[in-house]
Image: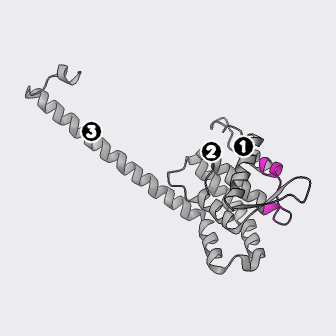
Amino acid sequence: MRGESLPLRLRTYMLAATITAHACYSTEGFRQRDLKFYLDLFLDWMTSPFIDGLESIHNTQILRFLNYLESEGNIKKSTRQKQPRYKLTRIGLIDSLRLLTEQKHPYHHEELLFICYFIANYSGKITDLIKAEGLEFPPAMQLEITRLLNYQSLVKRQIQKLEKHLETLKNKIIANQKAVLLTEKLIREKKITIKLLQC
């Protein structure tokens, strides 16, 4: 599952809102406006005098996102009532959690804190939902969900990514310093000139 045209940082909050809406309306299914409510709530959380607010998402984008999830088999849509209702499939729930907690690139700091806060507060509800599903969630899958809900592990992976990134920057600095020393040496030995460097 991908975010389907959503900016990477907005996708995080859309996924969190989808999981929340699914957990809160697991019996009857959630409506598009329920998803929008939780999305706006989470985006409001990220607005402060110290952090620039994230751009809002329009209803058309939300509907496109839901249609995409349905086409990928990650969500089931019911039209028996006046307004369509949606439920994440078991694969959709796992994929949403995986995308939320296993991003390849380092998270922005505020994004990481949001995810940790989200997992710490909603993991109980998600766990209860999994238990209620019974045979739909075999033990191996429950273990996978438990792993994905381990935010301490997420923080550890983030630290490892940042340490690797810092090591890369350190190596670039060292390489640049060596290049500067070599250039200065060549200038002193008059093997190159400053004018040549400016070309």
- Decide whether residue 32 is among the magenta residues: yes
Instruction: Specify few, some or many for label 2: CA neighbours under 10 Å numbering under 14, 14-19, or 20 or more.
Output: few
Q: Quadrant of the N terminus?
A: bottom right
Q: Are marks 2 and 3 in contact (CB under 8 Å)?
A: no
Residue 72 percent across, percent down from the top left = 66, 59
Q: Earlier in the sequence, mark 3 or mark 1?
A: 1
Number of numbered discs visible in the structure rendering: 3
Which comes sooner in the sequence, label 1 or label 2?
2
Q: Which residue is mark 2?
A: 5
Residue that numbered label 3 is attached to:
176
In contact (CB < 8 Å): disc 3 and disc 1:
no
Q: Nearer the viewer, residue 123 or 1?
A: 1
Q: CB atoms at circles 1 and 2 under 8 Å apart? A: yes
Give the spatial CA distance, label 1 vs label 2: 9 Å
SS type, badge 2: loop
Q: Of the residues shown, which amino acid type is indicated by label 3?
A: Asn
In the image, residue 37 sits, relative to residue 126, either above or below, namely: above
At a point 50% along the width and 51% down the height, the residue shown is 106
Mark 1 element type: helix
Who's the residue at 69% across and 39% down the image?
A: 47
User: Quick check: is 107 in the magenta stretch?
Assistant: no
Give the residue displayed 27% in from the left and 38% down from the top.
Answer: 176
Residue 86: give x, y in percent of width and height. Answer: 79, 58
Label 2 or label 3, whichever comes before in sequence order: 2
- Left or right for 41, reference 119: right
Q: Position of residue 125 (x, y in %)?
A: 75, 66
For disc 1, the marked residue is 61
Q: Which residues are magenta?
A: 23-36
Density class for disc 1 (Cα within 10 Å; few <14, some 14-19, many ≥20) is few
Q: Looking at numbered disc 2 in the image, what kind of residue is underneath it?
A: Ser
